[in-house]
Image (spheres, coloured by chain):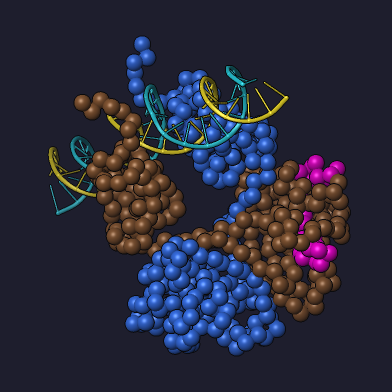
Chain colours: A blue, B brown, C yellow, D cyan
Amino acid sequence: MNSDTAQPQAEAAGGPPLGWQGIRDVMMDRIRTRHYAPGALIPNETDLAAEFGCARATVNRALQELAAAGFLERRRKAGTRVVAEPRRKATLEIPLIRAAIEDLGAAYSFRLLTREVAPPPPEVRAALRLEDGARLLHVVTLHLADAVPHMVEDRWVVLATVPAIEAADLTRDNPNEWLVRNAPYSEGTMRCRAALAGAMAGHLGCTARDAVLVVERATWLDGAPITLARQHYAPAYGLTLAL
Amino acid sequence: MNSDTAQPQAEAAGGPPLGWQGIRDVMMDRIRTRHYAPGALIPNETDLAAEFGCARATVNRALQELAAAGFLERRRKAGTRVVAEPRRKATLEIPLIRAAIEDLGAAYSFRLLTREVAPPPPEVRAALRLEDGARLLHVVTLHLADAVPHMVEDRWVVLATVPAIEAADLTRDNPNEWLVRNAPYSEGTMRCRAALAGAMAGHLGCTARDAVLVVERATWLDGAPITLARQHYAPAYGLTLAL
DNA sequence: AGGGTTATTATGTGCAGACATAAAAATCCC
DNA sequence: GGGATTTTTATGTCTGCACATAATAACCCT
């Protein structure tokens, strides 16, 4: 009697097998519908396992996922409670310029406007937390969609961290793609603001008084600075994030 | 002999116990350092378990995490391979306006500029995928940091989905906070662009020709439209994302 | 009553073993 | 040779069980 193993759950519950993802969904639903009130404790894993007719580990997997997503807060012995005001996150898939433009149905091309090894201006030094006397590669690239200017990228690359880029042919692979393929990063910051086109107007084919989106991104690999990029997008363009 | 249970790993490996998070970190490191080449297959779970001196389930937990993060791609029978060009994501903690301003060290306050039940303009109907004849609440709120204009929020709320807001006192809890507490959402879109201040200049205390960041957000709960918000930030402000 | 020690409890993580599932590889049959 | 079928293999998931860890709750002693 009951010596059978591995025939999944569905003893107490009257339904299909669920599984940990199913349990996660049910619990998420209970949080949203306030079956579990904001800020309140929910039953412990053992009780939930009994309710769902599964092992505690299965419940644990589901709850850990919801905790990681910010909807539950778990503390040993204290139990698991519903976060009252979850701080929700929007995620931006960082666009590979070529892919972003081709996804728009346009033909991608780019022009390397500047390529020089130069001492970084103070703002760049500060943003990357550089030491004195670091040598950087400075590249300015214009990216076009169907031959229409789409974005100008002004980028500084730390040669001490990524020496190989000095020998790379950046007229074949643009700096953006070269770095994605050859310089993984472990940390970074990204900032997104509005500015007048100003001096970029010429490249972007708009007037100096047009408003453009500016994205600044800095990356490091285990603390070693890699690159700082400032991207000016053409006036019409906006970033789409997913909630 | 060997009837002892639950004394953790560290047989084959010469080191400390690791654990699944440790294994995840080691594997992440091997990916970054190209010990596993981009696009290549990595050893299967059984072999890795042997290498790390742990159970297969422990390796599985680690690899699933890396797959969810987009660094590995796993397919049954085919095995696990390193994603060649991982599409990395930046995440934006959606700011609760009050908290965002107080984190800046400023005193938060707000003024409700408009509050009316009105038929939505076509663009709002389209953005929320509304049916004809839906009643919406339209609120315009000015948020201030130390009494200086920080952001103007122009918001439409679908009364059929969130009827309770019609009776809410939005001069106590601003619409932003009220919705966070009372209207959970399951899906949404968010868009971020630059625009000239234009008609918002008066509220924001800048000129009509200044560039401002505009964030548009729409949310639904299981397909039912909740709200559309358009936020115009003061010229200096930018969004900071985490990589 | 107060303060320190001990028990209790919920989560965190681990293990071995089993079966499920998908997909590639090998095989068979016409 | 080509198409359909079977085998093999790697991942996906679940079950029980055990111990680790952290933090609250209970206790005890002065």
Q: Residue at x 40, y 66 (%)?
A: A184
Do we see residue A152 in this rendering?
Answer: no
Q: Position of residue B15 (x, y in %)?
A: 30, 46
> Is residue B161 part of the magenta span, yes or no?
yes
> Is residue B155 part of the magenta span, yes or no?
yes
* Residue furthest top as drawn: A1
Q: Position of residue A52 (x, y in %)?
A: 51, 26
Magenta-colored span: B143-168
| A132 to the left or right of C15 | right
Give the camera-side residue of A125 and A94. Answer: A125
Q: Position of residue A93 (x, y in %)?
A: 52, 61
Q: Residue at x 53, y 70 (%)?
A: A217
Q: Residue at x 81, y 67 (%)?
A: B148
Q: Residue at x 39, y 69 (%)?
A: A183
Count of numbered badges drawn on the protein: 0
Give the camera-side residue of A123 and B110. Answer: A123
Q: Image quadrant for the N terminus of chain A?
A: top left
| B98 to the left or right of A241 | right
Q: Looking at the image, is A82 positioned above or below residue D2?
A: above
Q: Looking at the image, is B198 positioned above or below residue B177?
A: below
